Amino acid sequence: MTIGSHLREFHDLPVVQFPDSVKGPEGTGQLPAPGEVAWSVAVDSYDSEEAWGDAFARFLASIDTTKVRALVVGAWNEAYDSGPERVIEALVAAKDRLPALRALFLGDIVMEECEISWINQGDVGPLLAAFTELEEFGVRGGQGLVFPALRHERLRKLTVETGGMPVEAVRGVAASDLPALVHLDLWLGTSEYGGDSEVADLAPILAGTRLPSLRHLALRNSEMQDDICVALASAPVVARLEVLDVSMGVLTDDGATALLTGQPLTHLTTLDLHHNYLSSAIRDRLRDSLEAEGVQVDVDPDDADSDEDDDGTVWRFVAVGE
């Protein structure tokens, strides 16, 4: 699976592309009110005649940005070859013009523009330092991604989508103090695309001490999904979750059995394991054990596929890699 469509909704708002044709306030008559949508600013990744910074400057000159609540950064110039440093600099420079901003997504880039593993990312620390009132932050792409350990008082939802999340970025998230965070979603990916973390790197998240408000935990799209589930079976954070998501990865009967035989999961509202490599027997056990207790269980194998070499070696794949 690849990411083939742009965000349609962000921060509970419909996403609207800022048009190429708008050059100033006089051209905004047919556009929605500034605070009623999530604005997407993007250029063609391959051969745009306009730099992303120029498109953003048009946006600032045309829209009443004091009312903008959500902003989506789409493709920048040559995202397959260049990081978003200038994008980040432009956003930070404009922070005083965006006092109502509560949600920011960096890198809403789809496969036709740049495969997720090709997206060049950068240091997102300055964005979170500048926008202290953010409630939601998302980023796509793991190559060059830097997420330093930080403290953010307001952030309620954090999403990191990668085909391979660098270990230092994983450790940075895990070491961050995020007292308001309710929803954490990490796509850890595979070593083939830079995902070099181990379960031990997730230990602070699994302990939950820096995430006292966490209710939705997604550790997914991982080639070490079984090991993650083994750790979750006794992780303190699980007891206060409402949603546990270990989907999109290389989950086999070993990982699912660890969950079934570990700490109780009957307090959950949802257990998401879709895209998996489970046997029919284990799927039935999961449903029988948890659905009767009111837990919504998703064990759909989805499009999970495997290959077998002539020597019997079985290759299994995460949902989103390249």
Image (cartoon, grey):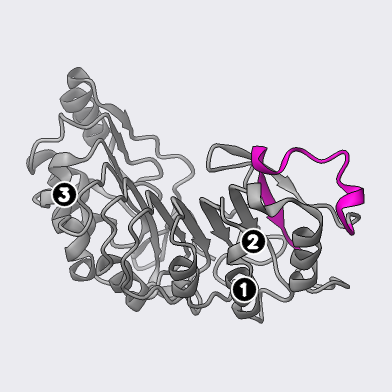
Q: Quadrant of the C terminus?
A: bottom right
**Of the residues under marks 2 and 3, which one precedes in the sequence?**
2
Magenta-colored stretch includes residue 265: no
Q: Quadrant of residue 106?
A: bottom right
Residue 11 in the figure: left or right of residue 315: right
Q: Amino acid at mark 2?
A: Arg
Residues at discs 1 and 2 in contact (Cβ within 8 Å): no
Mark 3 → mark 1, Cα distance in angstroms:
37 Å
**Measured from the top left, where is residue 76 in percent x and y?**
70, 70
- Mark 3 neighbour density, 10 Å: few (under 14) some (14–19) many (20 or more): some
Mark 2 → mark 3, Cα distance in angstroms:
38 Å
Observer-nearest of 190 and 60: 60
> Residue at the location (59% across, 71% down)?
119
* Residue that carries the numbered disc 2 in the rendered image: 97
Observer-nearest of 37 and 242: 37
> Residue at the location (50% across, 69% down)?
127
The mark found on residue 237 in the picture is 3
* Residue that carries the numbered disc 1 in the rendered image: 93
**Measured from the top left, where is residue 117 in percent x and y?**
54, 70
